[in-house]
Amino acid sequence: MSMAGNLRKVTSLGGVGGLRKVARLARRRPRVDLSHPARSPLGSSVVNCVTYRDGVRTAARGDLVDAVQSVRKKGEGFVWLGLHEPTDREFAGIAELFDLHPLAVEDAVEAHQRPKLERYDETLFAVFKTVCYVEHEELTATSEVVNTGEIMVFVGKDFVITVRHGRHGSLGPLREELESDPHQLAKGPSAVLHAIADHVVDDYLTVTDSVHADIDQVETEVFAETGARVDPGRIYQLKRELLELKRAVAPLSRPLEDLATRPIRAVDPEIQAYFRDVSDHLLRAKEQIAAFDELLNSILQAHLAQVTVAQNEDMRKITAWAAIIAVPTMVCGVYGMNFDHMPELHWRYGYGMVIGVISVACLTLYRGFRRSGWL
């Protein structure tokens, strides 16, 4: 079915999935960016719908259908539709209007996807994992350090659809930044795709820098000479959170490589050079994560070695004191036997001599253990 046919079909829909009905539902509530610091009121899943021509934002006239009709009638510009966690019902009319593949639509609505890049005829579908650093006063064995979300991007000849999942990863500031550079935005929907990829990867680098600070803190405490014991659960928690970050970063290498090197109809050739730069930044983030993982392994091994050394020192102290206590125990045990004929049993100075022998023997053992470092 052609785009024009889909447009007529969606425009005439009167059922539950009709796009007009979705647009009316969206108009009842403000179309705002759910996590933009200056736009906090909750609205519908439609965050924003903007038309751009020659890199310049045009005045809004009508709803989404009117915007798409205007762009396709004039054959220039594109529509950027932003959504936040849409339902199947809200997304059904949009999928019909833009002729989106059912598999891509299912992924966009359900979320929990790996970063990937897929092509469906004239449409490009990209999935990005967003990350943010969770601030905490003190790192514990249960602290959440990295929080993840998702951004799905549909890119066509005359449209960009962004579907965001999670409370972070707002695209409001990114949209404003793009609008301040009309020359770049005039390159079309692929310029928006590059800006989103660059924004996501920059967040990776920001989060890795913050995680590095946590690792430095744990490392300092492990090798501190204060004698304080470090909870190994904190190290394991950092490794778990680092694994979460790795799952977001590592799979994105192949999609960015394809965007930077392979000819894709939906991507302007001039934009591919920019994707190579993003790929370089992603490689830096991957290398940092791999280095952090190795560093945490070393810190954990060092901590376990310190625990083993401390246990050995405790065992040596216990052994030394046990040897010292064994002397009076042995002497008292011998003279505690009920025999009539024992040496020095009836001697007037026998008690004092035994106490003196015990004291000298214990003192000699104590000094010997002190010299050897056991006490």
Image (cartoon, grey):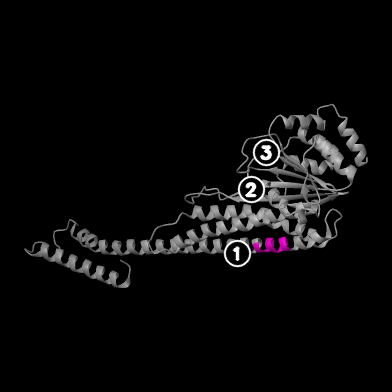
- Residue at image x 8%, y 65%? 349
Measuring 83% from the left and 26% from the top, which residue is drawn there? Answer: 15
Residues at marks 3 and 2 touching, judged by CB atoms closer than 8 Å? no
Upstream in sequence: badge 2 or badge 1: 2
Instruction: Tell me the kind of residue under disc 3.
Output: Val
Q: Position of residue 66 (x, y in %)?
A: 83, 36
Which of the 4 image quadrants contains residue 44?
top right
Give the camera-side residue of 297 and 202.
202
111 and 275: which is toward the camera: 275
Is 202 left or right of 22, judged from the image as shown?
left
Q: Is residue 126 visible?
A: yes
The label number, if any, that marks residue 281 in the structure image: none
Residue bearing mark 1: 291
Q: Earlier in the sequence, mark 3 or mark 1?
A: 3
Quarter holding the C terminus is bottom left
Marks 3 and 2, how far apart in space?
A: 21 Å
Residue extending farthest to the left is 348
Assess disc 3: are there few (<14), some (14-19) or many (≥20) residues with their C-alpha within 10 Å of its C-alpha: many
Secondary-structure class at tag 3: loop
Q: Cα distance, mark 3 to mark 1?
A: 40 Å
Residue ID for mark 3: 32
Tag 2 residue: 148
Q: Which span of residues is magenta-colored?
A: 277-284
**How far apart in space, not on screen, are marks 2 and 1 (Cα)?**
21 Å
